């Protein structure tokens, strides 16, 4: 009886936990971009600077997006549990 050749075990570059963290980071980035939305006017002759240049769009949303990208880098660099 001939021995069957063992197939090599396929391993992903990252662990399962890392992929969950990547999904969470992607969701944080999407939330940041959603916070940037809005501020427009239906009338092209009206310019509402207070709404367009609000704290949420100028400060909060970019910080959330940057945090999301930093979280993504951390998720990739994190050593998977074995």
Image: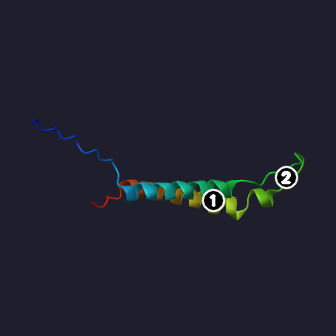
**Scheme of image coloration:** rainbow
Percent x, y for residue 82? 27, 60
Question: Which tag is nearer the camera, tag 2 or tag 1?
Answer: 1
Label 2 sits on a secondary structure element that is loop
Q: Residue at x 57, y 61 (%)?
A: 63
- Give the residue furthest to the front: 1
- Residue at left offset 88%, top offset 51%: 46
Q: Which mark is first along the chain, 1 or 2?
A: 2
Locate residue 36: give its quadrant: bottom right
Q: Residues within 10 Å of mark 1 (few under 14, many from 20)?
A: many
Question: Residue 41 in the image: x percent, y percent?
Answer: 84, 51
Residue 33 in the image, given as x and y percentages of width and height: 63, 53
| Residue plotted at (12% across, 38% down) | 3
- Write down the residue under mark 1: 61
* Quadrant (top left, top right, bottom left, bottom right) of the N terminus: top left
- Which residue is under mark 2? 47
Horizontal arrangement in the rendering, residue 64 relative to residue 35 (left or right): left
Is 4 left or right of 46, judged from the image as shown? left
Alpha carbon distance from label 2 to label 1? 21 Å
Residue at 63% over, 59% down: 61
The label on residue 70 is none
Instruction: Tell which residue pokes out farthest to the top in this image.
Output: 2
């Amino acid at each position: 009886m001939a021995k069957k050749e063992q197939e090599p075990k396929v391993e992903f570059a990252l662990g399962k936990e890392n992929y969950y963290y990547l999904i969470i980071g992607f969701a944080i980035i999407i939330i940041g971009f959603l916070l940037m939305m809005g501020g427009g006017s239906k009338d092209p002759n009206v310019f509402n600077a207070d709404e367009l240049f609000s704290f949420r769009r100028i400060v909060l949303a970019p910080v959330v997006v940057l945090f999301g990208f930093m979280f993504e880098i951390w998720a990739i660099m994190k050593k998977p549990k074995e």
